[in-house]
Amino acid sequence: MSKDKRKYSSEIVDGVEQAPSRAMLRAVGFESDDFDKPQIGIASTWSMVTPCNMHIDKLAESVAEGANASGTKPVIFNTITVSDGISMGTKGMRYSLVSREVIADSIETVVGGQGFDGLITIGGCDKNMPACVMAMARLNRPSILVYGGTISPGCYNGKKLDVVSAFEAWGEKVSGKISDLDYENIISNACPGPGACGGMYTANTMSSAIEAMGMSLPYNSSNPAVSKDKSNEKKIIASSILNLIRNDIKPTDIITKKSIENAVRLITILGGSTNAVLHILAICKTANIDFGIDDFQKISNETPFLGNLKPSGKYLMEDLHDIGGVPAVLKFMLDNNMLNGDCLTVTGKTIAQNLKDVAKFDSNQDIIMPLEKPIKESGHIRILYGNIASHGSVAKITGKEGFIFEGVARVFDCEDDANDAISTGKIKKGDVIVIRYEGPKGGPGMPEMLKPTSAIMGAGLGNDVALITDGRFSGGTHGFVVGHISPEAAEGGMIAFIKDGDIIVIDAIKNEINVKLQKNELESRKKEWIKPELKYKSGILYKYSKLVSSASKGCITD
């Protein structure tokens, strides 16, 4: 194949002077004619660490098989992943968001060092997918993301289960609402096999956003992990990456402000995870796109929330797939003037061209509600400002929680103390739980607060207790919650000065979050505050806490 189709690999393998490179590559399976083929790096996030990624080795092999058949030369390499679901509520969660940067850095390092002409990344959980896209944008060579797919639901007593069922069961158990036997059976049956968490949690949120962004193939985000549709993707993936190379279509040709708007509007309709705010901001920074947290609010203001999907609704990702998947939702958006149809995608066609033959929803389905009967007339993601969050915060308000909450502050300087208070019945109706020093620097790593929010829901307090934090939330979180409070406590943000008994008002209509204190009282408390030392003095968490930006800027490190 011509040298211009081997823009990067030719520097590695061509010429007499690169004979040692060819010698080493023969040892990993290259044959003579392989040196004339475009090299495709396949970044696999396979690991036994989590069910989200446990099957990705087989998927990577399948993709490599397709690449070989298409006339390119695939090279599989691995990067890391960590499991939020397993580490949730422990110190291990401090490493979760950090892993996004590590994954992006590692993919950039391997692809840049090895001279691959194209890149296929295979992600299976929420941090590794945005990390893959960040790496693609940095490298800016032909790339496609492949999603490992969603998990099949578990079942107990005729009820569909997922990992959030297991977290909420803990709250039900400690409040005496279920027996020990029911609790153990829920735990045993919640996660039956491979795939990412089944609801519109962060993994499915990000896979959907990336498809709408144009960086993955149609249906890739909704094809279940264990399905014929997923196993059949290899041929079209291989032909698509070759087409991108031939036409020199790069990520920055696809990831634009208009395609980002498509992604944000889609996840607004679906009721996606608040983590998408962090991840999309990070992608935009990497791709040099001017898109900030206020743009999320603008789109939310003009976009209805229609997805009857967990955690706020009834259905799972596999149910959405059964009615046409993400392409059917995008088709609906295009037909209703909610999609920039001229955006380029990894098929080499525009998103409108991809959707030309996609069927419309069956009128009898109740997974995506009609425009005239929305779950909420505007989006669920709200960007709140006020004396607690002068640089912004992120709330997930679906409407079922109400829109205004005023309550009494119950302040905790770490998640563990809050969990203890909830599990021992010390939290009462009307309380606003404040969990601080869990931000990007203070955590460090901005851990997710799924354990306390699940305990609140499990205890039946979901409509009666609010929670605010400079940490963040799992996509499985629901209830009256506000996270990403910036500036964070560790940086002297106002959340550091709240005391037990203060009155906090959260207003998702005016998009405000305030503590009812006079400015002079807040200033007095600020003068008494002593900045805490970093929790870690060495290692990756130390480096992260020194480098990371605020949540309002996506928690980026570059």
Image (tube, rainbow, N blue to C red):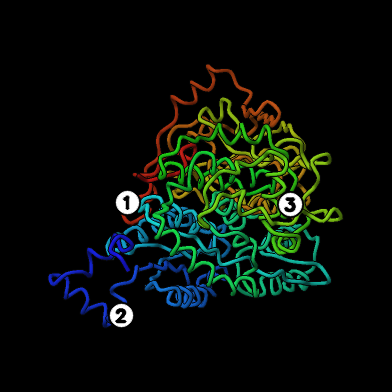
What percent of the width, then of the height, locates residue 278? 51, 45
| Distance (Cα) linking label 3 and label 1 | 37 Å
Q: Is residue 146 visible to us here?
A: yes
Q: Secondary structure at mark 3?
A: helix
Q: Secondary structure at mark 1?
A: loop
Image-based side of 554 in relation to 268, left or right? left
What type is the residue that disc 3 sits on?
Answer: Met
What percent of the width, then of the height, locates residue 287? 42, 44
What type is the residue that disc 1 sits on?
Answer: Lys
Position of residue 296 relative to residue 21, above or below, is above
Image-based side of 364 in relation to 304, left or right? right
User: If you read the primary sequence from the N terminus, does the residue marked by circle 3 or circle 1 appear first?
Assistant: 3
Q: Residues within 10 Å of mark 1 (few under 14, many from 20)?
A: few
Q: Residues within 10 Å of mark 3 (few under 14, many from 20)?
A: many
Disc number for residue 537: 1
Quickly name the residue at label 2: 30
Between residue 21 and residue 464, name the one nearer to us: 21
- Quadrant in which residue 533 is drawn: top left
| Residue visible at 60% across and 22% down in the picture | 517
What percent of the width, then of the height, locates residue 213? 54, 49
Residue lying at the far left in this picture: please name it: 17
Quickly name the residue at label 3: 457
